[in-house]
């Protein structure tokens, strides 16, 4: 999907009949001189952890760990609504909330945003009884020390610098970058 000067791609991983992971990539298809009006490190009420690596207003780099709410059930827009209907019609299992890592890097001429979401059911964490954001168990203010939710978030946060380093190398067109450089988080077992 192309939105103005941004190209967006989405990939889903369906594993054992479940919506396991989602990868969303948005980027400028070509370099140009743009002044961005974005605050990638601004907490949007979903952030468990944020690291701001910006070097200036037009040289931003931020990593966030948080949760997406109503991933399938509250899909908005024709393309996402169609995708959500397909997930439901095929009987694919999914979690209402999916923890994510989001890395955003841009300069005056280029933009890259990568979000990777994870199904917490892979660690045996079922949907909570509270569907609303404020009372949800994934809401950072509700995450209890030692809980499975905390362990899940901590695993993503521990892995975040490795992921961010690979994103930065990709942004800088490092030709030695390999898929293994992105690694994977060691999520808690079931």
Image (spheres, rainbow, N blue to C red):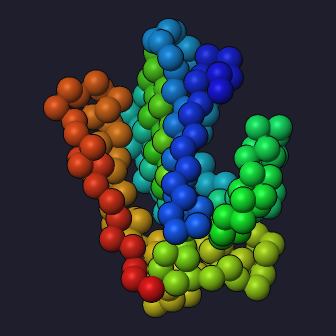
Image-based side of 133 in relation to 178, left or right:
right
Q: Is residue 158 above or below residue 129?
A: above
Query: Which quadrant is home to the N terminus?
Result: top right
| Image coordinates for residue 181, horizontal then vertical, percent | 23, 47
| Image coordinates for residue 137, horizontal then vertical, percent | 66, 80
Q: How many marks?
A: 0
> Is residue 7 visible in this depiction of the protein?
yes
Q: Is residue 157 above or below residue 101?
A: below
Residue furthest to the bottom: 146
Residue furthest to the top: 32
| Image coordinates for residue 66, horizontal then vertical, percent | 56, 62
> Is residue 45 visible in this depiction of the protein?
no
Query: Which quadrant is home to the C terminus?
Result: bottom left
Which residue is pictured at 46% across the width and 12% down the height?
Answer: 31
Which residue is pictured at 44% across the width and 34% down the height?
Answer: 105
Image-based side of 60 in relation to 68, left or right:
left
Residue furthest to the front: 90
Which residue is pictured at 22% across the width and 36% down the height?
Answer: 177
| Image coordinates for residue 82, horizontal then vertical, percent | 79, 44
Q: Is residue 32 above or below residue 152?
A: above
Which residue is pictured at 80% across the width and 52% down the height?
Answer: 85
Q: Nearer the viewer, residue 109 or 122?
A: 122
- Which corner quadrant of the image does residue 26 belong to? top right
């Amino acid at each position: 999907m192309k939105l103005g000067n941004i190209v967006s791609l989405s990939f889903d991983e369906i594993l054992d009949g479940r919506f396991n992971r989602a990868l969303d990539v948005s980027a400028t298809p070509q370099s140009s001189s743009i002044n961005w009006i974005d605050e990638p490190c601004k907490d949007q009420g979903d952030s468990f952890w944020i690291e701001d690596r910006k070097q200036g207003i037009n040289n931003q780099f931020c990593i966030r760990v948080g949760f997406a709410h109503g991933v399938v059930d509250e899909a908005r827009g024709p393309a996402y609504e169609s995708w959500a209907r397909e997930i439901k019609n095929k009987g694919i299992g999914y979690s209402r909330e999916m923890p994510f890592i989001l890395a955003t890097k841009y300069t005056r001429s280029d933009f890259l945003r990568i979000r990777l979401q994870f199904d917490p059911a892979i660690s045996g964490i079922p949907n909570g009884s509270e569907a609303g954001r404020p009372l949800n168990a994934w809401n950072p203010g509700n995450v209890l020390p030692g809980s499975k939710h905390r362990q899940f978030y901590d695993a993503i946060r521990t892995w975040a610098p490795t992921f961010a380093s690979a994103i930065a190398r990709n942004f800088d067109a490092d030709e030695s970058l390999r898929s293994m450089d992105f690694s994977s988080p060691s999520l808690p077992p079931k």
